[in-house]
Image (spheres, rainbow, N blue to C red):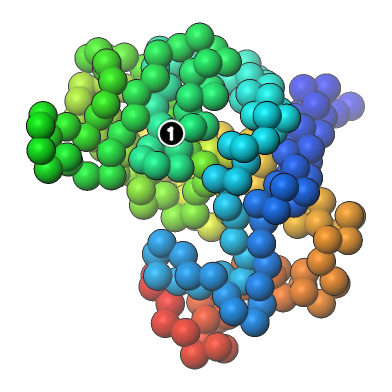
Amino acid sequence: MPDLADEINSTVRRLVALQLWQLGAIKVNLAEPFRLVSGNYSPIYINCRLLISSPAFVDLFAAATRLIVEHRQVKFDVVAGGETAGIPFAAFVARAFGSPMIYVRKEVKGHGLASRIEGVLDAQARVLLVEDLITDAGSKLSFIQAIREAGAVVEDALVVFDRLQGGGEALATKGIRLHSVTDMTTALSVCQDAHYLAAPDLESVKQYLGNPQGWHEQRGLLFNC
């Protein structure tokens, strides 16, 4: 018999994914693929920044986060957001739990105190890193390193959307559990059920996700491993 908590979590993940499609946070362009931070390209782009303008989504995100924290027994004293996209989502989580918040800069500030961490962070405090999206985890690993160098403990990271392209595995090598509110598999399932994309376009996106390197090579695009 399926676990009730798992069923509820699955339903919430689909609701969040549906919101992403409805709010235009998921874009697909097969003719002119999107350039990612890594330098690679993708026919599907997730713009979670749009979500912060929807009060309904913010409430749904907070509720989904609470389910994850309770079901997976995530313990934290402080919520951290990564510059810049993670900051508002970290603020939503901190407000929902009544927790202190900090944010982590991408690099050391070139003036003043030259700090990467803004806010009060006590040594040995347990930190939950909150971000908008994860692909290969490059920026997340940098934020985690900064938090640990400040003397705090970080063992969990929460993202709105997991592209399922290796980020979770990369974090696991550093002792970090990844928790996502929704992910690419769920989003594509919702897309198929709601007919947001024509079947051939959806299949093209799936082909890219199944073999990004081969997809790049077919189009004469450089692929950064």
The furthest residue to the top: 98
Q: Is residue 172 left or right of residue 95?
A: left
Q: Decide: is 66 above or below 49.
A: above
Q: Position of residue 200 (x, y in %)?
A: 81, 77
Quadrant position of the N terminus in the picture? top right
The part of the image, by quadrant, that contains residue 188 is bottom right
Instruction: Please say whether residue 184 is visible from this viewpoint.
Output: no
In the depicted view, which residue is nearer to us: 191 or 53? Answer: 53
Q: Is residue 26 left or right of residue 135?
A: right
Give the residue pinned by disc 1: 87
- Residue type at the position of mark 1: Ile
Q: Is residue 35 left or right of residue 101?
A: right
Q: Decide: is 190 above or below 129.
A: below
Residue ID at (68%, 24%):
59
Q: Decide: is 123 above or below 88.
A: above
Q: Position of residue 212 (x, y in %)?
A: 55, 73
Which element carries disc 1, helix, strand or loop? helix
Q: Position of residue 157 (x, y in %)?
A: 46, 33
Q: Decide: is 141 above or below 225.
A: above
Instruction: Please say whether residue 150 is visible from this viewpoint.
Output: yes
Q: Is residue 212 left or right of residue 109?
A: right
Residue ID at (52%, 81%):
216
Residue ID at (42%, 22%):
79
Q: Residues within 10 Å of mark 1 (few under 14, many from 20)?
A: many
Residue ID at (59%, 37%):
52
Quadrant position of the C terminus in the picture? bottom left
The part of the image, by quadrant, that contains residue 17 is top right
The furthest residue to the front: 53
The part of the image, by quadrant, that contains residue 159 is top right
In the depicted view, which residue is nearer to us: 106 or 134? Answer: 106
Q: Position of residue 198 (x, y in %)?
A: 85, 71
